[in-house]
Image (cartoon, rainbow, N blue to C red):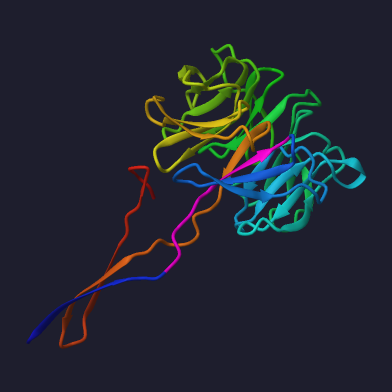
Amino acid sequence: MKTLLFVIAATTAVAPAHADMFIQNSFVDRVIRYNEVTGANEGVFVNPGNNLLSPTGITFGPDGNLYLTSTLGPNSQGSILKYNGQTGAFMGSFATAPGYNAPRGLRFGPDGNLYAVEHDGQVYRYNGTTGAFIDVFASLGGVPGFIDLTFGADGNLYVSDDENNAVQKFNGANGTYLGAFTSGASMNKPKGVRFGPDNNLYVSDTYNNRVLRFDGSTGAFMNVFASGNGLNLPQGIEFRPDGLLYVVGLDPSVRRFDDSTGAFFDAFVTDPANLTQPQFMAFSPTAVPEPATILLLGCTCLGGLGLRLRRRRTTNGLPSV
């Protein structure tokens, strides 16, 4: 049987993948977009208006659209506003509920629903598709202080509490309070909270100008993970596939640290002319594939065909996925 071998190389003409950074400005009611590779300002993505007032929470949904908290909504309650994730166009008020008066962080949970922190010690749950109010999922009984939230690999909910200087833990299935999770560190107004690639919990210790690391299973204090190098009043924190921890500060800037060692990497964004009281950031989903080289290898007279696709990207010299 005769075997024929040929190679065809072709570069597909598709738009590059993107995951730009979006930072909310709580004082001037807008969202600025920054290039994910260079940190360059790419302009105002969300403009003031449409009842947007003092946005603090920001996240992208499974639908690729952007969601912002606003302290202004129906009957002067807080609300969650929805924007087109590609253009920034306003898509309407997505969710609100009685008592939702001091909104802070928000995230979509493992169940696809939207969880939104209310500073007065409550976490509201909304239908992730319709925005319909479901319930007050978690509460400290009216004790204020909730700022940001994240879900752990264990499925439980973790909420930063800047009045009690702790991270509170709730059952991720039913919202039952499981106690203060963090211990062994003198935090002063913790804000951002995220689990890292090592499954440990990281918290921005705002008034101490540092990021702390806690054991992801026990909550025991491990170390001061990042500090210095101009880190000033850190707020939101995010881990990225480029191997870096991004920290936004009120100074205003975004600084990056190695996500394994905490070593300072660079001042990624310094933009005092456009950022005013930035608190949290979000990265857009990577929804569009990069240009790819397709290699077609091997063909027999019976019509066998092998297909191989190779793709590689680097971000500032670091591999990214």
The residue segment tinted magenta is 14-26
- In this rendering, position of residue 243 left or right of residue 178: left
Q: Residue at x 39, y 24 (%)?
A: 263
Q: Residue at x 43, y 68 (%)?
A: 14
Of 223 and 244, which appears nearest the observer? 244
User: Residue 35's spot in the image, x, y percent?
Assistant: 50, 47
- In this rendering, position of residue 144 left or right of residue 58: right
Residue 38 appears in view:
yes
Counting every numbered tag in the picture gives: 0
Look at the picture and state if 78 lies above or below 169: below
Look at the picture and state if 210 lies above or below 24: above
Q: Quadrant of residue 172?
A: top right
Residue 244 on the magenta segment: no
Residue 123 appears in view:
no
- Classified by dominant secondary structure, the portion drawn in magenta counts as loop
User: Residue 99's spot in the image, x, y percent?
Assistant: 86, 37
Q: Looking at the rendering, in which quadrant would you find the N terminus?
A: bottom left
Of 111 and 166, which appears nearest the observer? 166
Q: Residue furthest right?
A: 75
